[in-house]
Image (cartoon, rainbow, N blue to C red):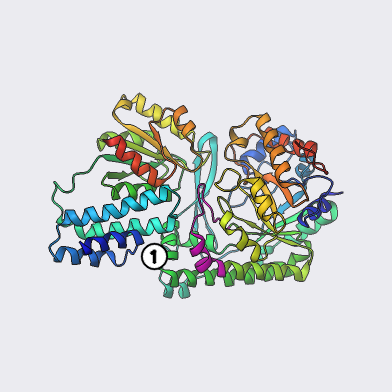
């Protein structure tokens, strides 16, 4: 089986030859990976996204032996868009991302000064929103995806479908937004609806361009969990938030299927999200990412038992403890356990449970892939 | 007292818009500011405890905290210095490199709601600023928030900064944040760790007694 067949077999709840594996590296780990794989000729700074994640070159994907090519849309441009000398920037929605130094010479972009912190419902009508038709957003995508499809056998995961709930959080500021969904629901609905309509049209425009090349459409982050509990109560989620997500996700899937009826949709939602999984399935989501193992109520065996028939799991290798602080043997045990719990019957794509940050050595990631090749072959035989 | 009960319940329900009116009503009816404050703090204690028991979620707790703040605005000018005496002073901040503030703010609001004085020194705070703020405010507790595995290494630096300044034995250092564990707290020489904001408030009160 080639990589694409392996991935598509697994996402159709069937057993491929082995468990598919992939990962997204942030800039620091990418640089470490270049050294570990002896690929110093690769660019020092490939295209980088908002989370400092980089576009991994095909050559590195092949040498590392992973199965998926991730692609992100380009940034759109609006009157808000601006770059600053210190590396910080304001995105097309008006959100300011501050470049922030972290321990060990790394950096990250953190959201500060949300643009709609003091907005009223009326302000939502006069705010300058991004233009979904902006051709900058998909410039060069077609060429890149066509090349990947024609020159490799990788599955293509497209991170195109934008967020609603989480974007509202960015635009309003976390604290104000969480109060809005309880005490200011009229505003909350108005903001989510505004964003949802823009995201729907954006999806239509991008899918018309490149939908035929998309194997998995990753719905952008809608983080609904914290470490120790869901971010919001299931009751508030169902009453206030879910209607908007359902509208976006169903539309995204329908739009995607116009161009590739076999393609799947993946939702990224971090943290302790178990109470929402049945809702997520009901909204038509095929794949759940990242199945954060260290979060509460996210026991991998229980999740497989409860939801494994209805949803595919992607991720699940602990990135809060084992990858940054564990030993090589800890990584082996983590991979074995995740495979044992989630791989039987297919329906599992193994990956670190987040974009890999600078505190994880590339050596451990290479070892993770090696373990998948050693223990992830079907039929799974792990005691 | 029906009116105080209603204040307590409204605080629990997080109705930040109704709170100022209710507090004013109680004052107008001749209830003392201290009694009103006690009723609000009683409501806040339930919020903190239920949050610790995983029975409440962040949005509801935030609304209660803001209801507390709105009610306190009405009470503040009416409370005497004697009334306003706090249980202790906490210097609170997110460590250097960490721009996350919601957990920190929540801890701050719950601490205030439980009667502690909170000096919030913000996010992305270098170790030496924690020390300066602790000295300037005669802090009993320094509470540090680290939300990322990549900012956790700041914690031992903060401990060392307090040691270097010769005041490590004069303050208790508390830490919290998603990736933090009791084991990490012990290993780095912190005095206390709480897994959530409600726990932090209870722990801080214990440390001040």
Number of labels in the image equals 1
Q: Is residue A131 visible?
A: no
Query: Taking A176 as reference, is A342 above or below it?
Result: above
At horizontal 49% and vertical 44% (from top left) the residue drawn is A100
Residue A308: percent from the left, percent from the top?
70, 54
Element type where label 1 sits in the image: loop
Query: Taking A53 as reference, is B22 above or below it?
Result: below
Provide the chain ID for the residue under circle 1.
A
Query: Taking A9 as reference, is A316 above or below it?
Result: above
At horizontal 34% and vertical 55% (from top left) the residue drawn is B65
Which of these two is toward me, A27 or A336? A336
Residue B206: percent from the left, percent from the top?
31, 37
Residue A69: percent from the left, percent from the top?
74, 51
| A177 falls in the magenta region | no
Q: Residues within 10 Å of mark 1 (few under 14, many from 20)?
A: few
| A239 falls in the magenta region | yes
Q: Is residue A77 visible?
A: yes
- Chain part drawn in magenta: A222-243
Residue B84: percent from the left, percent from the top?
18, 48
Which of these two is toward me, A151 or A67? A67
| Drawn side of residue A181 relative to residue A139, left or right | left
The C terminus of chain A - image quarter: top right
- The residue at the far right in this view is A1
| Drawn side of residue B160 relative to residue A17, left or right | left
**Pointer 1 residue:** A118
| Occupied quadrant, residue A331 | top right
């Amino acid at each position: 089986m080639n990589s694409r067949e392996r991935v598509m077999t697994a996402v159709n709840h069937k057993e491929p030859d082995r468990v598919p594996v992939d990962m997204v590296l942030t800039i620091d780990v990418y640089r470490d990976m270049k050294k570990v794989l002896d690929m110093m000729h690769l660019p020092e700074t490939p295209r980088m996204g908002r989370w400092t994640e980089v576009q991994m070159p095909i050559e590195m994907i092949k040498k590392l032996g992973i199965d998926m090519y991730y692609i992100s849309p380009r940034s759109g441009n609006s009157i808000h868009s601006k770059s600053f000398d210190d590396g910080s920037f304001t995105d097309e929605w008006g959100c300011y991302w501050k470049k922030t130094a972290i321990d060990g010479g790394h950096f990250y972009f953190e959201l500060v000064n949300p643009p709609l912190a003091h907005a009223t419902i009326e302000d939502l009508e006069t705010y300058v929103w991004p233009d979904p038709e902006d051709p900058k957003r998909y410039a060069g995508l077609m060429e890149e995806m066509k090349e990947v499809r024609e020159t490799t056998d990788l599955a293509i995961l497209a991170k195109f479908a934008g967020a609603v709930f989480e974007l509202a959080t960015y635009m309003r500021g976390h604290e104000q937004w969480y109060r809005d969904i309880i005490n200011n629901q009229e505003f909350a609905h108005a903001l989510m609806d505004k964003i949802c309509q823009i995201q729907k049209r954006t999806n239509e425009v991008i899918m018309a361009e490149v939908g035929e090349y998309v194997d998995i459409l990753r719905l952008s982050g809608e983080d609904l969990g914290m470490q120790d509990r869901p971010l919001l109560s299931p009751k508030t989620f169902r009453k206030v938030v879910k209607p908007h997500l359902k509208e976006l996700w169903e539309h995204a899937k329908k739009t995607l299927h116009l161009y590739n009826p076999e393609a799947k949709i993946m939702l990224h939602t971090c943290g302790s999200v178990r109470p929402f999984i049945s809702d997520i399935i009901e909204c038509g989501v095929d794949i759940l990412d990242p199945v954060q193992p260290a979060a509460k109520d996210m026991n991998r065996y229980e999740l497989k038992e409860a939801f494994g028939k209805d949803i595919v799991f992607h991720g699940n290798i602990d990135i809060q403890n084992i990858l940054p602080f564990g030993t090589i043997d800890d990584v082996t045990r983590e991979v074995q356990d995740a495979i044992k719990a989630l791989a039987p019957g297919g329906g599992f794509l193994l990956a670190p449970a987040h974009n890999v940050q600078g505190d994880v050595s590339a050596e451990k990631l290479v070892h993770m892939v090696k373990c998948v090749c050693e223990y992830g072959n079907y039929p799974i035989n792990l005691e | 007292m029906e009116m105080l009960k209603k204040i307590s319940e409204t605080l629990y329900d997080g109705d930040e818009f109704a709170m100022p009116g209710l507090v004013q009503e109680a004052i107008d009816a001749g209830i003392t500011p201290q009694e009103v404050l006690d009723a609000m703090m009683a409501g806040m204690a339930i919020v903190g405890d239920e949050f610790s028991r995983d029975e409440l979620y962040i949005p509801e707790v935030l609304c209660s905290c803001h209801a507390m703040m709105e009610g306190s605005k009405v009470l503040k000018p009416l409370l005497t210095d004697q009334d306003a005496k706090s249980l202790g002073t906490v210097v609170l901040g997110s460590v250097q490199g960490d721009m996350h503030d919601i957990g920190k703010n929540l801890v701050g609001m719950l601490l205030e709601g439980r009667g502690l004085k909170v000096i919030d020194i913000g996010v992305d705070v270098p170790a030496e600023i924690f020390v300066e703020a602790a000295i300037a405010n005669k802090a009993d507790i320094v509470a540090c928030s680290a939300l990322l595995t990549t900012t956790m290494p700041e914690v031992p630096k903060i401990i060392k900064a307090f040691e270097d300044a010769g005041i490590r034995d004069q303050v208790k250092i508390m830490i919290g944040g998603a990736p933090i564990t009791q084991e990490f707290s012990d290993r780095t020489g912190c005095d206390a760790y709480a897994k959530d904001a409600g726990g932090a408030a209870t722990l801080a009160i214990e440390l001040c007694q």
